[in-house]
Image (cartoon, rainbow, N blue to C red):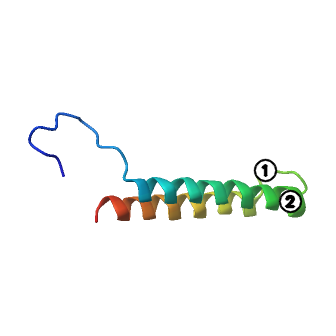
Amino acid sequence: MFKPQDHRLVEPLPTPALIILLGAWTIMALWAGAWNVYLCDGAWYTLPVIFTYLIAWVVGLALALYLLTE
């Protein structure tokens, strides 16, 4: 992964992983907002919203890690 002349401690995320991660977080925010406004009567802490955040975050993280380890 690191080249011998590369002295950086952390490499930047590859572009596809970053796009997928940001896309998953965007979908998470939109989906949770829809649950919040239409189904949960404005309560952000309801279970569907919490599960939506967790699922989207885990999927985005898993995809980013998969692309990082390719």
- Give me the residue at 10% from left, 37% from top: 5
Q: Position of residue 36 (x, y in %)?
A: 82, 56
Near-viewer residue (28 or 15): 15
22 or 52, nearer to the observer: 22
- Where residue 62 is drawn, which disc sits there? none
Q: Position of residue 68 (x, y in %)?
A: 33, 58
Which residue is situated farthest in the left direction here?
4
Amino acid bearing label 2: Cys
Q: Is residue 60 above or below residue 43?
A: below
Circle 1 is placed at which residue position?
44
Task: Give residue 31's position: percent from left, percent from top.
Answer: 73, 61
Residue at position x 36%, y 63% from top? 67
The mark total stands at 2
* Mark pair 2, 1: CA separation: 8 Å
Give SS at disc 1: loop
Q: Is residue 44 left or right of residue 41?
A: left
Q: Quadrant of residue 50 in the image?
A: bottom right
Q: Is residue 9 left or right of residue 14?
A: left
Residue 12, above or below 65: above
Dividing the picture into quadrants, the one containing residue 27 is bottom right
Query: In the rendered structure, are the residues bearing label 2 and label 1 in contact, judged by CB atoms less than 8 Å apart?
Result: yes
Crowd band around label 2 with a 10 angstrom C-alpha radius: few (<14), some (14–19), many (20+)? some
Crowding at mark 1 (Cα within 10 Å: few <14, some 14-19, many 20+): some
Quadrant showing the C terminus: bottom left
Judging by the rendered image, the residue that carries numbered circle 2 is 40
Label 2 element class: loop
